């Protein structure tokens, strides 16, 4: 898959693409990332890409023409009908289900906005999807683009050391969309706090039941909305419901 990233700060991506376990996906080409500097598509001596907003107000707005010229060229270079994605507070919150869809896709053109945003005429003409990381505002879309690329890269075959690792992620359908359970490692006792005895028992059925109960308890306490989704989807057993009733 190929992701074309349109940004004013391509240098921000260099350490991200070459560091950590997900670099395997980028170095192998499983997830191809092409960085495009928006100013390369601007005109004039100053390569200007922004201007003051009509109607007044603070800040600057990214101009439609350089963006349109850039996206049109990138789409012409691709052999597929790639979606054009804008990272924006107005977008749909990024979820595990969305990441799974992107991980099986051919990629996209990712737009990293800056300033007060982009000229709405460009958005209306070219953007096919908008994504948000949550109800807060960033200085630009680069961090959001990295978040999507990282989440997609770790789902590619062979990227994680253990092929089953991502199956145990929070929100994964393998866990019925629940939060993951707590995890422990050596030493068995740390600062007078012991590892739960069941994890030392070697009894796999009891361990799995404990982990399931922990996932249910944690999700019910911190993200009760996920419990409702799992219940409506028929993913909770009678034993699960008994535990939740006690909680």
Image (cartoon, rainbow, N blue to C red):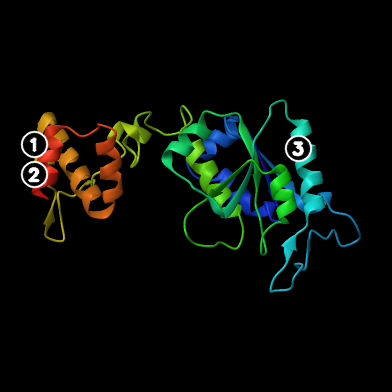
From the top left corner, tell me how far across and down residue 156 is, in percent.
Answer: 48, 30
Identify the residue at horizontal 35%, vertical 41% (top origin).
Answer: 171
Q: Between marks 2 and 1, how big is the CA–CA gap? A: 7 Å
Contact, mark 2 vs mark 1 (Cβ under 8 Å):
yes
- Tell me, yes or no, if residue 200 can be seen here: yes
Identify the residue at horizontal 60%, vertical 63% (top origin).
Answer: 139
From the top left corner, tell me how far across and down residue 202 is, in percent.
Answer: 11, 32
* Nearer to me, 192 or 173: 173
Per the image, the residue denoted by label 1 is 201
Q: Quadrant of the N terminus?
A: top right
Task: Determine whether, in the image, residue 154 is placed left or right of residue 231.
Answer: right
Q: Between marks 3 and 2, how big is the CA–CA gap? A: 57 Å
Please name which of the two marks, 3 or 1, marks the residue nearer to the observer.
Answer: 3
What label does residue 74 carry, if any?
3
Q: Secondary structure at mark 3?
A: helix
Per the image, the residue denoted by label 2 is 197
Contact, mark 3 vs mark 2 (Cβ under 8 Å):
no
Q: Secondary structure at mark 1?
A: loop
* Nearer to me, 98 or 233: 233
From the top left corner, tell me how far across and down residue 128 is, in percent.
Answer: 64, 40
Q: Residues within 10 Å of mark 2 (few under 14, many from 20)?
A: few
């Amino acid at each position: 898959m190929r992701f074309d990233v349109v940004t004013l700060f391509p240098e921000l991506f260099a350490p991200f693409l070459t560091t950590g376990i997900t670099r395997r996906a980028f170095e192998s080409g499983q997830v191809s990332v092409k960085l495009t500097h928006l100013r390369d598509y601007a005109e004039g001596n100053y390569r200007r890409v922004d201007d003051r907003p009509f109607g007044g107000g603070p800040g600057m707005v990214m101009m439609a023409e350089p963006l349109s010229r850039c996206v049109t060229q990138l789409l012409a270079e691709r052999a597929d009908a790639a979606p054009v994605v804008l990272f924006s507070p107005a977008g749909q919150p990024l979820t595990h289900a969305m990441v799974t869809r992107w991980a099986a896709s051919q990629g996209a053109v990712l737009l990293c906005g800056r300033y007060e945003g982009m000229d709405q005429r460009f958005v209306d003409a070219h953007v096919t999807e908008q994504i948000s990381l949550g109800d807060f505002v960033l200085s630009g879309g680069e961090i959001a683009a990295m978040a999507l690329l990282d989440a997609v890269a770790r789902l590619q075959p062979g990227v994680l050391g253990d092929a089953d690792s991502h199956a145990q992620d929070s929100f994964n359908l393998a866990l019925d969309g629940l939060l993951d359970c707590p995890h422990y490692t050596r030493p068995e006792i740390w600062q007078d706090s012991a590892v739960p005895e069941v994890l030392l028992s070697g009894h796999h059925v009891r361990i799995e039941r404990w982990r399931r109960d922990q996932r249910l308890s944690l999700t019910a306490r911190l993200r009760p909305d996920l419990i409702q989704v799992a219940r409506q989807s028929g993913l909770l057993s009678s034993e699960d419901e008994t535990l939740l009733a006690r909680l």
